[in-house]
Image (cartoon, helix red, strand yellow):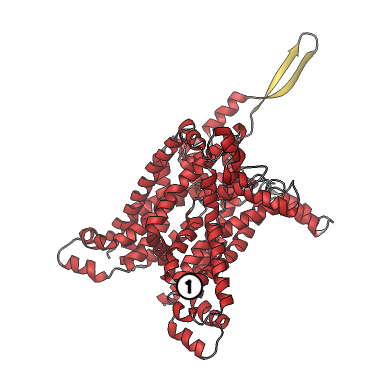
Amino acid sequence: MSEAMAHKRPTLLNAFIYGFIVLWLVLAAVPFLWTVWGSFKVEADFFSRESWWNAIFGTATIRETGAAFTGDGYYGAWITRDFWKAAFNTIIVTICVTSISLTLGTLGGYALARSGKNYAFWILIAALVFRAMPHITLVSGYLLPFFQLNIWGVLPTSIIVLVAINQPFTLWMLHSFFLSIPKDLDESAMVDGCTRFQAFRLVIMPVMWPGVVTTGLFSFLLGYNDFAVTAMLLSADNQTMVPKISSFLGSIQETGNVMFAVAAVVSATVPLFILVLFFQRQIVSGLTAGAVKG
Amino acid sequence: MPNKTFFAFILPSLIAMVLFIALPIVSVVVQSLHVSHEQILVEVENCQPFGGCSTELRVDTAATAALREEQPLGRFNGLGTYVNRAHLATSELGVILSSERSIGEKWAQILNLPFYKALIFTLVYCFVVTPLAMALGFTIALAVNALPKVTKGPIIFFSLLPMIITPLIGSLILYWMLSPNGILGATIQHIFNDPTLSLRASPALTWGALLTYGVWTNAPFSFVVFYAGLQTVPGDTLESAMIDGASRWERIRYVIIPHLAPLATFVALVQLMDNFRVFEPIVGFSAEANATSLSWLIYNDLTGDSQQFGSAGATSVLTILGVVILLSPVLLRTWREFKHKAV
């Protein structure tokens, strides 16, 4: 459709379309490129009072360190300020959140997709309301009980909370993926003598992998991007990357080492970059799956 | 599927949601009805050799700490927290509204009340960012749809970045560029020829920056969904519209937009829900002096020197009510459809 119409499109409109897309790409990508480039400079360049050309050529960086690029910010963040520990915690949290979410979510989503009873519908509606709850309102409900039970501040608590917060979304998404698998498949397996669980595990799951991968990506993003839960429920020793970055901001502006935070921000962006690079198609299909099916 | 099997499958997930979503909501309601104990005062008799005796009231620190330790929830306060100055501020609001000032002054005074300041920003953010981001996303989708297919992949790759980025990190990246020594902040000072113009000093600039961030991070979602929707627009309808002499704009207006309307409802719903909990940008932009949100108020109550669970609870309950009001059209419609189907 688009190619056929392109022939007849006036030049002016074409110019406008290309200009607009280029403008959008600049808006979308340049902040990241700018920050990545600037993270290898010293503060006097990245936050230059004289001219932003300094950030490009690294005038002050050359003056202070002798080269146009410096890894001081990264060294300061990762080694001096123990960012590696936060990165390690993030790995634990995201792996656990993703795998537990998917285990619970596939079981629940399968049941919801195959039930057809009224209560299944109401569970989905309740999940929609839960999905809309601002996370910080839930966190304010956790703190007192968690203090009392003495489970505040450790990774497992945060993992379970993130899994639970993630469930409504996971259920909705997996439910809609399961709906796209014909019912006959598991029913014929059960006629052949499988139990419901065997049919689920041996017949349905093997054809569900694309849906599971897509949902897993979004579970991963929720665990990785979360700030409200991890900032409030983890003690300073157990912090993951995002709350660690925010704690940098408080202390770093005093010592004048904002570049630690810039380096940490760039480090935390890299995994997301790689994720989009490899899983672009799954992310797009996940975003549209919920939408197209209503 | 028999009920027993159904519940066997869904039980783990249901337990997780009840324990960590439904119960905390109950806990928040209970907390909001309590405030921490007042300090215990003891009467101490002070006798001096020549001056005689006087009694004075002193704070019994040990007893206060012991009581607070024993009952961390505090004492029952009813709806007291809801109507105090930090929340609905009913009495202050009454005074302001009944005063003889101009509307502008009244508005400024209402904006000084922390809850209303946060509520107004949250609503503005919701209802400005959502339509603008959808319009931008739709325009990008139309433009990409008109380009050769090969360009699609790279464009989607770069477009996804603002959406997928951690909200705190995304807002920090923009904040650093907008700081007075950053590339955009310095440029803005140059354009307006005002060396004191900065995010910290200018509420208007702060609001603008936060709203811009919101559109930047929300637009890709609309773009991706609308782009997928554009692929399903029936070619026959478009062709017959062309034969009937519909211009490009008319084809968009009368064929494409009606076709995408159901998608638009879905996108608007999701984005309104997400924008209502706007929180990280306020932290990232250090914007609390000029703009706060409901979520930020709760965070602030919980992180202060003394954690104010009652205050955080009351704001949380009010926020949850807001979410329910926001969702009510959808819930009502679902309810009606469900009744309809049942009959």
Hey, which residue is sitting farthest bottom in the picture? B244
Residue at 53%, 77% in the rendered image: B257
Q: Nearer the viewer, residue A63 or B35?
A: A63
Q: Is residue A121 visible?
A: yes
Left or right: residue B336 versus residue B127 is left
Identify which residue is drawn at 46% across, 41% down: A241
Residue assigned mark 1: B145
Which residue occupies the extreme right position in the image? B100
Residue A62: which quarter of the image?
top right
Residue A241 position (above or below residue A288): above
Q: Observer-nearest residue: A251 or A291?
A: A251
For the C terminus of chain B, give its image quadrant.
Answer: bottom left
| Relative side of A117 to A54, left or right | left
Q: Position of residue A33 (x, y in %)?
A: 52, 51
Left or right of residue A55: residue A243: left
The chain holding disc 1 is: B
Q: Is residue B115 visible?
A: no
Which quadrant does the N terminus of chain B fall into? bottom left
Asked whether B322 or A79 is in front, the reply is: A79
Q: Secondary structure at mark 1?
A: helix
Residue B133 at x, y = what percent?
57, 64
Name the spot of residue A114 as percent of width and height, x first: 30, 66
Of A109 and A94, nearer the camera is A94
Q: Is residue A250 above or below residue A5?
A: above
Amino acid at dot 1:
Asn
